[in-house]
Amino acid sequence: SFSRIAIAPEAGSAAMHGSYADDAQSIAEGVAAQLEAILLRTGKFEVRRPRSPVDPESPWQTIEWANSQPCDALIQLCIETSPFRNLGGMRIWVAHEADDASARPPDRGEAFGLPQSLNYIPYQDLSLLLGALIHGQLANSSRYKARPVEFAPSFLMRRLSMPSVTLSLGYITTEKERERMMQDAFLEGAAQAIAKALVEMRNRSQEMAYAR
């Protein structure tokens, strides 16, 4: 069943800007802590989190940690930076590449605008579903400006042995965004939305299992 969740909070691109790194890590950790508490209260989930902060410049660290966990999905939480002060909102990324050497490519050509080499992706459908469910929950709240799920040829996400979603929580270089993300209401609301999506994902996985 869909019940074991890995949560990896990180400073994201903000880690490259020393003046923002600490706040960015604090925001990501805050959402992760709230999300873990909500999931554990349901009595239906087990949660794994790294013992030390994830280094966004060492993706192999996250890959090795995540793949060593007996988990059903990875939620990566990160913070963005940008020189453009008008940027805002959340971004949801999904991408995967076949780990299984015996995996067969699809019969058709390019899918979703991705190169042929990325077409057969074992966890892509589940990752897309999870990303869509998270987006749906965030879109229900006027507090969050979540963009539609996007594909990303990510070095990290393409090498994971489980479905995964990377959620960029916002842009800390935008003062309005930074203030918003530092509020308890933002941390709790984001965690609640992600948790609701994970519960729905669990329900759907059980329905799919019963249908087999």
Image (spheres, helix red, strand yellow):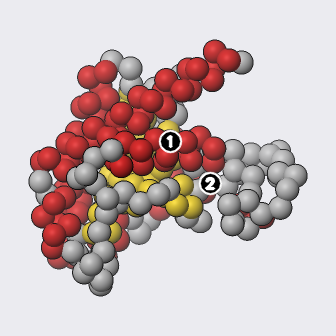
What crowding class fits label 1: few (fewer than 14 Cα within 10 Å), some (14-19), or many (20 or more)?
many
Q: Residue at x 44, y 65 (%)?
A: 58
Question: Mark 1 or mark 2: which is in front?
Answer: 1
The residue sitting at the right extreme is 107
What crowding class fits label 2: few (fewer than 14 Cα within 10 Å), some (14-19), or many (20 or more)?
many
Q: Position of residue 6 (x, y in %)?
A: 42, 40
Q: Amino acid at mark 2?
A: His
Circle 2 is placed at which residue position?
A: 96
Q: Nearer the viewer, residue 89 or 99?
A: 89
Q: Amino acid at mark 1?
A: Leu
Q: Residue at x 69, y 65 (%)?
A: 114
Q: Nearer the viewer, residue 176 or 15?
A: 176
Q: Position of residue 206 (x, y in %)?
A: 56, 20
Q: Quadrant of residue 154?
A: bottom right
Q: Is residue 92 above or below residue 72?
A: below
Q: Residue at x 32, y 40 (%)?
A: 193
Q: Is residue 129 visible?
A: yes
Asked if labels 2 and 1 touch by Cβ distance under 8 angstroms, the answer is no
Q: Is residue 5 above or below residue 190?
A: above
Q: Residue at x 58, y 20 (%)?
A: 207
Q: Quadrant of residue 22?
A: bottom left
Q: Is residue 8 visible?
A: no
Q: Helix, strand or loop at disc 1?
A: helix
Cα gap from disc 1 to disc 2, whole angstroms: 13 Å
Q: Position of residue 89 (x, y in %)?
A: 31, 63
- Quadrant location of the C terminus in the rendered image: top right
Identify the mark at residue 130; answer none if there is no mark: 1
Mark nearer the N terminus (1 vs 2)? 2
